[in-house]
Amino acid sequence: MFIINNILILQTNRFVTDSPSTLRGFIASRFPDNPLLHHHLNNPNKKGLVYTYPKVQYKIIDGTPMILGIGEAKEIVKTISNIDYLNLKGKRYLVTEKKLIEQDVNFSVSEDLLTYKFLSPWLALDEESYKRYRKRNPEERQKQLESILVGNIISMAKGLEYVIIDKITALVDVKEVPTSLKSTPMLGFLGTFSVNFEIPDYWGIGKSVSRGFGTVKRLESS
């Protein structure tokens, strides 16, 4: 399955130290009428979150803000490319250069195991799975995370209307890292994983991917 996505890269006058959540909040405040940008229902009679794989995702990679638009959201990323500054929790960053990359990317089952690196913490566990994780030995934890990763990919595919028929196999090599979501301490994971599935660079896996968590990049085979 081929999908067009746009990546907007914003070069700023200084290294951005804020989180992707603050970037998301700033863009949402500038464009409040588009639910794809903030994932909240834009209906006065029905409030809440849009529960599907986020087609707009916010990243800060090595101090550089990036906004990813997938499929139907690719044009939205174009419309916000005219911003010339960022105001992130009172800190103002001037946008000195903008680069919009349009790509035709493949999202599908692969015949081979492909290896990826997490560029930001993967939020794999919810409250219940965290309790089970803590009770298990290292080998059981490994299997639990591999099962969750497969589930994450299946959820992504469902949100993008791609039907997976073949069996997905995953191997993870990650370590625990402390992180936080909305000021709440969370357990995240960094490292690598291999899976027989093609995932485009900078897409997110797991929970809160719109806020930059679980961003992946494929590693070249040696």
Image (cartoon, rainbow, N blue to C red):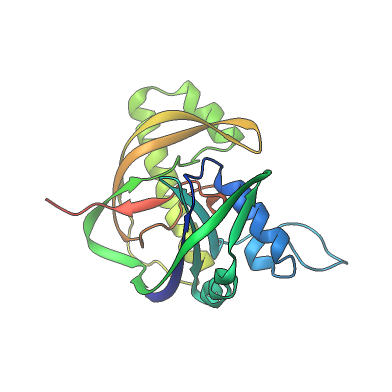
Query: Between 128 and 107, which is closer to the camera in this rendering?
Result: 107
Please say whether residue 39 is visible from this viewpoint.
Answer: no
Q: Residue at x 38, y 51 (%)?
A: 216
Query: Between 109 and 59, which is closer to the camera in this rendering?
Result: 59
Q: Residue at x 34, y 68 (%)?
A: 108
In this view, the residue farthest toward the left is 222
In the image, residue 7 lies at what x, y percent?
44, 66
Relative to 185, say whether 21 is above or below. Answer: below
Q: Quadrant of residue 51?
A: bottom right
Query: Between 64 and 39, which is closer to the camera in this rendering?
Result: 64
Relative to 110, say whether 161 is above or below. Answer: below
**Picture mark count:** 0
In the image, residue 206 lies at what x, y percent?
49, 48
Q: Residue at x 24, y 52 (%)?
A: 219
In the image, residue 159 lies at what x, y percent?
53, 65
Query: Between 129 and 107, which is closer to the camera in this rendering?
Result: 107
Q: Is residue 152 left or right of residue 90?
A: left
Please say whether residue 130 is visible from this viewpoint.
Answer: yes
Q: Residue at x 46, y 54 (%)?
A: 204
In this view, the residue farthest toward the right is 45
In the image, residue 177 lies at what x, y percent?
44, 29
Q: Is residue 51 left or right of residue 16?
A: right
**Screen quadrant of the N terminus:** bottom left
